[in-house]
C-alpha cells in the first residue's frame, strides 16, 4: 500500500502541467469488460498469470543473470527500472519501479519467488478492486 501514494505524484504533475492523464492500456481494456466471464478472465490474467510470469522473468531469470555479472544492488536497480518501463505507461513508471524494488528485496531476503509472486498478486488484486470500487479515480 505505500506504493499507491507514489501513483498520485504523476497524476498531480500531469494536472499541474495540463497534460492529459491517460489510463494504462490494460485499464482501458478493463473498463470495457461487459460480462462476468470477461472480468474473471481479466482477473485471472492480472492476479495469477502476470505475477507468476513476471516474477519468474524479472526476479528469477533477469535478476539472477544480472546478479552474476554485477553487485546485487545494481541488479535490483536495473531490473526494477526495466520492470517499471516494460509496462509502457509513464505515470505508472515510478510506482511500478518501486514495486519492482520491493519484490526484488523480498526475493533476495527469502531466496524464493513465491513471496514475490504473492505480493505481486496482492498488489494487482488491490488495484483491480480499487478500479472496480472507485472507477472515477482511474479516468476515462
Image (cartoon, grey):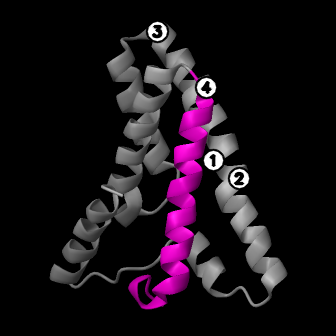
The numbered mark at residue 69 is 3
Q: Which residue is mark 1?
A: 51
Q: Are marks 1 and 2 in contact (CB under 8 Å)?
A: yes
Q: Residue at x 73, y 51 (%)?
A: 49
- What segment is highlighted magenta in the picture? 112-140
CA separation, marks 4 and 2? Answer: 16 Å
Q: Which mark is residue 60?
A: 4
Looking at the rendered image, the quarter that the N terminus falls into is: bottom left
- Residue found at x 45% / y 49%: 85
Which residue is label 2 attached to? Answer: 48
Instruction: Give residue 22's position: percent from left, percent from top.
Output: 43, 79
Please tell me whether mark 2 sits on a helix, a strand or a loop: helix
**Badge 2 density bin: few <14, some 14–19, many ≥20, Cα 10 Å:** some
Q: Is residue 131 magenta?
A: yes
**How far is mark 4 from mark 3, CA to CA?**
15 Å
N-terminal of the two: label 2 or label 3? Answer: 2
Amino acid at each position: 500500500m505505500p506504493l499507491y501514494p507514489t501513483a498520485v505524484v504523476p497524476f498531480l504533475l500531469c494536472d499541474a502541467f495540463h497534460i492529459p492523464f491517460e489510463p494504462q492500456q490494460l485499464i482501458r481494456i478493463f473498463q470495457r469488460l461487459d460480462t462476468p466471464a470477461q472480468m474473471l478472465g481479466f482477473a485471472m490474467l492480472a492476479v495469477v498469470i502476470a505475477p507468476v510470469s513476471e516474477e519468474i522473468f524479472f526476479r528469477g531469470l533477469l535478476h539472477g543473470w544480472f546478479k552474476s555479472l554485477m553487485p546485487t544492488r545494481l541488479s535490483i536497480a536495473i531490473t526494477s527500472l526495466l520492470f517499471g518501463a516494460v509496462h509502457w505507461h509513464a505515470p505508472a513508471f515510478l510506482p511500478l519501479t518501486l514495486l519492482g524494488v520491493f519484490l526484488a528485496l523480498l526475493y533476495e531476503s527469502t531466496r524464493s519467488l513465491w513471496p514475490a509472486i504473492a505480493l505481486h498478486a496482492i498488489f494487482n488484486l488491490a488495484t483491480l478492486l480499487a478500479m472496480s470500487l472507485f472507477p472515477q479515480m482511474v479516468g476515462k
